[in-house]
Amino acid sequence: MSRITEKDVDYVAGLAQLVLDGPTKAKMVKDLGEILGYIDKLNELDTTGVEPMMHVLDMSNVYRQDVVGESLTQDQALKNAPKTDGAYFLVPRILDGEH
Amino acid sequence: MEYEAVIGMEVHVEINTKSKVFCACNNDFHAPPNTHVCPVCLGMPGVLPVLNIGMVEASVAVGLALNCKISRWSKMDRKNYFYPDLAKNYQISQYDLPLCHDGEMEIDIEGGTKRIGITRAHMEEDTARNTHTIGTRESGVDFNRCGVPLLEIVTEPDIRSADEAFAYLTALKQILQYLDVSDCNMEEGSLRAEANISIRPKGTVEFGTKTEVKNVASFSGVHKAIDFEIRRQRAALDKGDAIVQETRGWDADKGITFVQRSKESAHDYRYFPDPDLVPVVVDEAWEQRIRESLPELPRARNHRFQAEYALSPYDAGVVTSTRAMADYYEATVKAGAPAKLAANWIMGDLQGMLVERKLDIAQCPVTAASLGEMIRLIEDGTINGKIAKDLLPEMIDSGKSADLLVKEKGLVQISDRGELEAIVRGVLDANPGPVEDFKAGKDRAKGFLVGQIMKATKGKGNPKLVNEILERLLAS
Amino acid sequence: MGQELFRLKAHEIRGAIRRGETTATEVTQSVLGRIGAVEGKVQAYTEIWGDYAQQRAADIDRRIKAGEDPGPLAGVPIGLKDNYCTTEGTTGCCSKILKGFRSPYNGTVVEKLLDAGAVFLGKLNMDEFAMGSSTENSSVQKTRNPWNLRCVPGGSSGGAAAGIAAHEAAVTMGSDTGGSIRQPAALCGCLGLKPTYGRVSRYGLVAFASSLDQIGPFTKDAEDMALIMGVIAGRDPRDSTSADIPVPDYSKALRDDIKGLRIGLPKECFTDALGAEMREKILAAVEVLKAQGAQVVEVSLPHTEYAIAVYYIICTAEASANLARFDGVRYGYRHPDAKSVEDMYRLSKSHGYGPEVQRRIMLGTYVLSSGYYDAYYLKAQKVRALIKKDFEDAFQSCDIIATPTTPTPAFEFGAKTDDPLEMYLSDIYTSSINLAGIPGMSIPCGLTASKLPAGLQLLGKPFDEETLIRVAYAYEKHSGWERADAPIT
């Protein structure tokens, strides 16, 4: 009674941008199935009328004033990047309409 | 078959706060690439967003101007998708509880007005900009725009034609500019419009399959794209083809829309409330404070100008087209200029001269008070209209007042009856031929004589007096 | 001063330096010497900043000499978990995907500690992105429990717990999302505090699950806990979720007086799931408190059994979004074979994350995906509200709640690595505290027969860390556990 199929795992891996090879995928199907099976415990509870928690603290309206502060220099911004041309972050060519 | 188009618009507006929406970086992405960035808008590990109160207030102001209800309680959500222009690979946006909802806007259409329902207006963050250099296998990403505050305004499917869509966008832009929340520059992308278009047999109520047209760089482009899309869908249905739900781009050169993305690759955005941000609660008092700070909006001002200054609907429309022009107009009238005359001068000569000089009315070197004074000088006969036309460019270029220039250049018109009569007599004596012609019934000769008199007065003769004296002497 | 300065507590170091009995340099050298001696066995640190620490200590000594106030933590050697963003060294979260990342900024707590005069020693090992309960998920190394080198130190802040237990720092700093401070503190025999959500800024802590994460200290005693909390607590304008509530003077909680204090024992935490030996240790510790005048009342937390299910929905959902940013564009690992944007994401992530992180991203993505949101995420947030309410109700009749921190003492390497669910269940007593947002502290309460530490978990009302510190202080005075020290040399 697996509650998650290989197809589900493929779909979710696509959303998460992960590629799972054969054995990894099989283990994922098994592990997620077990964990979701455990999570099903929650269905025992009737939560009709319970307001879902939005924030553990009852806080609202926390803002910054609209004031300009310091930015990084271009060098600092690019310092950790795998690939740049000194001004831009470089990535493999983006095809139009991908998003 | 006769079809009816059903159109809804989604407009993204970059809000012109000083700093970005969740960090203190300068909200001006026209800077060298990746210089208006910080750990927060670069999505560095460990950073947290803090919402800019300026964005909340600007958004509420827009909502109120669009007659929206303001949510007492709303929240920020994460919209998850991967793209290199999205620093965190999620966009902070608002999903099920937008800040503003259920509004409406009135637009002018042929033969009357129409109400366009505003479904919602919600806050989000803009993405970075990708650049592509032709011939390389890489793209560059500049995060200066990442985190620029963005307001998304969505209409009900109330629009029925490209003309109505154009009128909606024009009216919306006018409101946003009146509120001074955005420069609404479509070429630069500070206002971006998308249209959801479907058609249905006229008289039916069910919606047809819609397509979404994006990436159009101007209002007229939107107009053309919608027209094209309606024609394309009509042709498809007439042929018996089905409309495919898809996103289409606009090729301005070819004047056609083209498929960008079909529904099969639609995203599963996995929205959930952003735990890093707390709810936005706008109570009645806050809403009221923002409401009271709103300027008079374009339609209200237009109607008031028609009523208060007896302007024609056309004139009122032109002088209220921008808040700056309407302010300038009212100040000119307050400075003593008659309402109709002020409108004529501002819409005509002044506007023309500013366009020549590539100036906006807000940058006009001639103050409204100064223009009002100039118009008063015409009214009280100190100068005539022709002199005023020459005077105005000098006022613009020198920044001097009309009064000062008139004195400096001795431009006061000659209204002394004796002085003028002497000049007229001189001209008549010098031109016996035309005088004879006139007496022989050739009216044109009078025009020549007036020209000669004005030449003799260096254009300063009071035209009314000149005419009166000339007619008297010619008749004698 | 004696030879073994590294054994001193932070408040003792502070006092000795202020009195001129030692210097920051001497203390730092002593601790660095200790690290050199035991680190080969413990492997708590992923990076040791020896030169930096000595320079920093010398600078503090200079400032003291010049008569300046060097701050409340002047010369106190502190280690930081590898998920604290620091401009010094690297911040890698013990993940291959972030290896070598040099943060352009210091987190708020890092800045506060620096302003207070702390001397940072380096970065401490952890489960990759704080996901784990044994530190076995680190991509860097395995940290061993100083009490028994065959056992895990707990996790995810295993390096921080083992490091302080082996006296490789006076204080270490960790983070706690579902027990990641309290559980390793219990397994390594030190104090570990997860403050109330919002008490300490999260800015600069690499996020795992934003609604649950809190920064907190590991210390050798209650007095140090008060000292560190006084430095790190408080509202931070960079963290929207940090509370605007005044920070008390925690040193006032250091008084040996718990007369009349009501201690709640939740019946759900003392079921058969708890081993007899652990139960005995916990009840014995409660007896010590009773002897000082505390009263014991039974309370109920009826939704306890649902906490782990709720926890694993919420923490993985949040993590799936929080970890999306590690994509090889602006920083971190990019797979060399990436020829397209899609490749860049998929290859970098699949090679950059370890199995547990991938598992949690998958689970979190699944529970948020189209059609499942209501059944999982929304349901979990409803049950979370019930769990929070349980605590509010329980605190109507008591001042603090006492539970075991863990069901068992430290376990051996590999004991639970094959079964993720079993590993998750070891968070049974800790994860509900993060769900409710309340403060929790683990304090050592003796050794089991196999000479492994047991931990007593004290839970307080929101923002009442003072009472936890006061009870820990009183317990310390009367329990005698203080003399217990990990048998490592």
Image (cartoon, coloured by chain):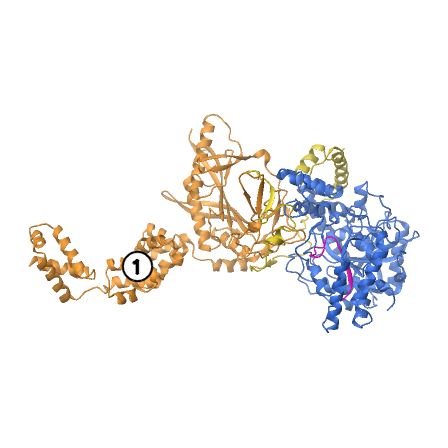
Give the residue number, with chain letter if any, for mark 1.
B392
- Looking at the rendering, the stretch of residues picked out in magenta corresponds to C72-89
Q: In the picture, residue C55 is in which quadrant?
A: bottom right
Compared across the picture, whether B125 is left or right of C317 comes to: left
The residue closer to the viewer here, B68 or B249, is B249
Q: Residue at x 33, y 50 (%)?
A: B314
Q: Residue furthest top?
A: B239
Magenta stretch: includes residue A80: no
Q: Position of residue B241 (x, y in %)?
A: 49, 27
Give the overall secondary structure of the magenta segment: loop
Q: Position of residue C77 (x, y in %)?
A: 78, 62
Q: Is residue A65 above or below residue C364?
A: below
Q: Is residue C246 above or below residue B160?
A: below
Magenta stretch: includes residue C79: yes
Number of labelled discs? 1
- Amino acid type at circle 1 is Leu
Q: Position of residue B28 (x, y in %)?
A: 52, 54
Q: Quadrant of the N terminus of chain B?
A: top left
User: What hue represents chain B?
Assistant: orange
User: What hue represents chain A?
Assistant: yellow
Compared across the picture, whether C169 is left or right of A84 comes to: right
Compared across the picture, whether B264 is left or right of B191 comes to: right
State the SS at label 1: helix
Residue B33: tell me if it is visible: yes
Residue C395: tell me if it is visible: no
Query: Who's blue, chain-wise?
Result: C
Q: Position of residue C43 (x, y in %)?
A: 82, 52
Q: In the picture, residue B231 is in which quadrant?
A: top left
